[in-house]
Image (cartoon, grey):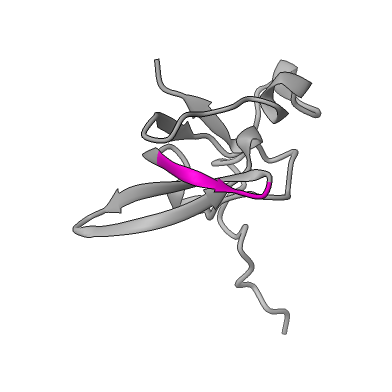
Amino acid sequence: MAHHNGPRKKTRYKFKKELRQRGLPPVTSVIQQFEVGEKVHIVVNSSVQKGMPHRRFHGLTGTVIGKRGRAWMLTIHDGNAEKTVIARPQHLKAQK
């Protein structure tokens, strides 16, 4: 039997994009910058596989704590635990 425990399992509807949102994201989402301490939303872009955070963090809000290469490090409260998530800017959206 096949192995059904990949990192994108159970994401058929969670990562689905709207009809006119399909395809690659604009370049502005790749070059966006954040300040340390800034709040950002994690919105996974399924058309970009690199730097994609785990599906359990999709829709959560975190605080930027630094940069690692091209990706940003965020801290997120998951219940009583504080977790560090590393994600590329295509999957992040600044909080207004």
In the picture as drawn, the residue positioned furthest to the right comes out as 23
Report the front residue among 68 and 24. Answer: 68
Q: Can the viewer see residue 43 in this picture? A: yes
Quadrant of the image containing the N terminus: bottom right
Q: Does the magenta stretch include residue 51?
A: no
Percent position (x, y) of residue 73?
Answer: 49, 48
Q: In this view, does 40 lie to the left or right of 87?
A: left
In the picture as drawn, the residue positioned furthest to the left comes out as 80
Percent position (x, y) of residue 63?
Answer: 37, 39
Q: Is residue 15 left or right of residue 84?
A: right
- Vertical position of residue 18 compared to residue 67: above or below: above
Report the front residue among 37 and 95. Answer: 37
Instruction: Please count the marks in the image.
Output: 0
Extent of the magenta region: 64-69
Percent position (x, y) of residue 85?
Answer: 47, 53
Q: Can the viewer see residue 26 in this picture? A: no
Quadrant of the image containing the C terminus: top left
